[in-house]
Amino acid sequence: MSLVKKFRELIETKTGSELNAWIAEANHSLIGELKSFAAGLLSAIKSIENAINLHWSNGPVEGNVNKLKTIKRQMYGRASFDLLRKRLVLAPD
């Protein structure tokens, strides 16, 4: 199985404990991009293991930030902060 497929399976099955073995295998690869990617993963290994293993996500927060920025761009130069607050608080999801 290719390294890319193994990494995808590692993420999909949420087996972060196998991440170190995958990184070691990627470091022995002949593909420079995979070696570079593996080196980048090592810089934050604990965070990445937690991201794989835990079910928590910051998706809802990012969704709210995206909604705010979209409304802000639509209103740029047209209205005050009070109207922005009304549109954000009263806007349907």
Image (cartoon, helix red, strand yellow):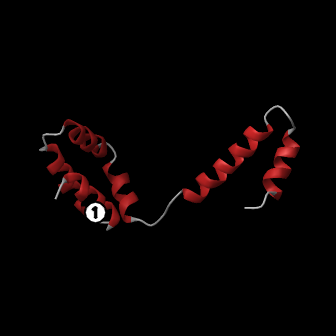
Residue 37 lies, with reference to residue 9, above or below; the image says: above
Point 79% across, 57% down: residue: 91
Label 1: how many Cα within 10 Å (few below 14, some 14–19, many 20+): few
Task: Say whether residue 73 is left or right of residue 37.
Answer: right
Position of residue 39 measured from the top left corner of the image (x, y, whole percent): 25, 40
Position of residue 31 measured from the top left corner of the image (x, y, whole percent): 17, 39
Task: Say whether residue 90 is left or right of residue 14.
Answer: right
Q: Which of the 4 image quarters holds residue 9?
A: bottom left
Residue where numbered disc 1 is placed: 9
Q: Secondary structure at mark 1?
A: helix
70 and 52: which one is in front? Answer: 70
> Which image quadrant: the N terminus?
bottom left
Query: What amino acid is at disc 1?
Result: Glu
Q: Which of the 4 image quarters holds residue 72?
A: top right
Position of residue 47 measured from the top left corner of the image (x, y, whole percent): 38, 52
Residue 80 lies, with reference to residue 93, above or below; the image says: above
Point 69% across, 43% down: residue: 69
Point 41% across, 65% down: residue: 54
Point 55% across, 57% down: residue: 59
Position of residue 73 measured from the top left corner of the image (x, y, whole percent): 73, 38
